[in-house]
Amino acid sequence: MLEVAPSILAADFTKLLEEVKTVENAKFLHIDVMDGHFVPNISLGTCVFQNLKGKVQMLFDVHLMISHPEIYAKTFIESGADYLTVHLEALEESKTDVKEMIRQIHEYGSKAGLAIKPNTPVKDLVDYLEDLDLVLVMSVEPGFGGQKFMKQALDKIFFLKQQKIEHSYSYLIEVDGGINDQTAKLAAQAGCEVVVAGTYLFHSQDRVKKIKELEAL
């Protein structure tokens, strides 16, 4: 079964808890954090999602699209991140040891994920796959919602699935960007296990039904 992670970036923030309740049949809640530096947009911080913690029965899937994630990881985990995903590119920019970052995320009490942008080769992740709980393939340039799915993500997903099978790794394969019923089906066929859906879900009149349809792909 394909898991769905509704992205609150597409929700109405004037009634955020009410909005999240409408997608609570999904397993994950995807929370995008952007700093206006690593990506050209600014979104929410810990104060937004920590107030949702305990009010919905979902796993908080926090995606840090920020520079120097090593400085902020502990704070986001203490605020309720069940999964904390950082960008490989951000760690390389700050010259942070990737394996040490993964170790620290685990030590702080969260599952650890690594994300890559569309232009980053998937093989750059190979040295870290055995330590990860989640790998996030960006199928759009990170920073804004509502973009079109980039099909080169499918080859990355397929590679990650093959690596997982070959080495008995335990990470989840997640894709984020341009997800709808058609692109989610392509991603699932390539080996994806979690799809992040924002606009597609929150612009729907029947979000519960849309989630169930995606899960059935």
Image (cartoon, rainbow, N blue to C red):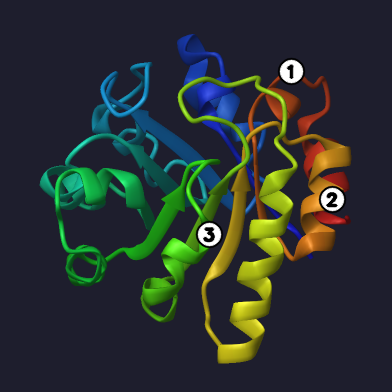
| Coordinates of residue 41 in the picture (x, y in percent) | 38, 16
The residue that disc 2 covers is 186
Spatial CA distance of label 1 from label 3 is: 31 Å
Badge 3: how crowded within 10 Å, few (<14), some, or many (20+)?
A: some
- Verify CB contact (< 8 Å) between mark 2 and mark 3: no
Spatial CA distance of label 2 from label 1 is: 21 Å
- The kind of residue on which mark 3 rests is Val
**Label 2: which secondary element:** helix
In front: mark 2 or mark 1?
Answer: 2
2 or 1: tag closer to the N-terminus? 2
- The kind of residue on which mark 2 rests is Leu
Residue at 47% across / 9% down in the picture? 14
- In the rendered image of this protein, does residue 160 appear above or below residue 5? below
1 or 3: tag closer to the N-terminus? 3
Position of residue 204 in the picture relative to residue 96 (left or right):
right
In front: mark 1 or mark 3?
Answer: 3
- In the rendered image of this protein, does residue 21 appear above or below residue 163? above
- In the rendered image of this protein, does residue 5 appear above or below residue 132? above
Hey, which residue is sitting farthest left in the picture?
A: 71
Position of residue 70 in the picture relative to residue 85 (left or right):
left
Q: Is residue 79 visible?
A: no
The residue that disc 1 covers is 203
The residue that disc 3 covers is 122
